[in-house]
Image (cartoon, rainbow, N blue to C red):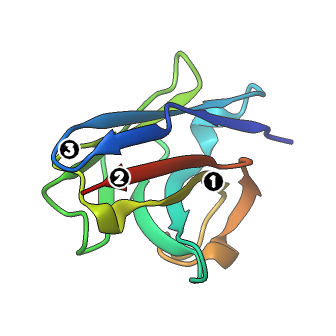
Amino acid sequence: QVQLVESGGGLVQAGVSLRLSCAASGRTFSSYAMGWFRQASGKEREFVAAISWGGSSTYYADSVKGRFTISRDNAKNTVYLQMNSLKPEDTAVYYCAASRGGSYYQTLSYDYWGQGTQDTVSS
């Protein structure tokens, strides 16, 4: 069992940076790939970024590539999402999730989810 708690969301202006954190409970954190998804109001949840269990491989949605960076610290059981050059279209609830395997881009591949953190980017 893995419990995930996101933090770091907020209300910011376009162009600034924000870093999200996701703290995981349990001693098996390092055996999970981790992902970030987001869901804007009235839209489906979409993939943002993912990182392999060891951190050597990362994956990004085209919409955030070059602006967002995912990283993890297995010693701290934490995964991060550094978001730079934020745009109003990045406004959403951001969720972190843990996966034992499967396609990193699909929600069905993830076994555990956090409760989400709201990020609002004003223009």
Nearer the observer, 22 or 74:
22
Question: If the image is split into quadrants, where does the C terminus sit?
Answer: bottom left
Q: Residues within 10 Å of mark 3 (few under 14, many from 20)?
A: some
Rendered residue at 33%/36% (across/down) = 18
Within 10 Å of the Cα at label 1, are there few (<14), some (14-19), or many (20+) other Cα atoms? many
Circles 2 and 3, Cβ within 8 Å, touching? The answer is: no
Q: Which disc is residue 97 wearing? A: 1
User: In this image, 7 relative to 10: left or right?
Assistant: right
User: Judging from the image, what secondary structure is the residue with disc 1 in?
Assistant: strand
Residue depicted at x 54% and y 51%: 33
Residue bearing the label numbered 3: 84
Q: Which residue is mark 2?
A: 121
Q: Name the N-terminal-most of marks 1 and 2.
A: 1
Q: Which kind of residue does numbered mark 3 sit on?
A: Asn
Q: Amino acid at mark 2?
A: Val
List x then y, in percent, for residue 102: 58, 74
In this picture, is 43 found above or below 20?
A: below
Q: Nearer the viewer, mark 1 or mark 2?
A: 2
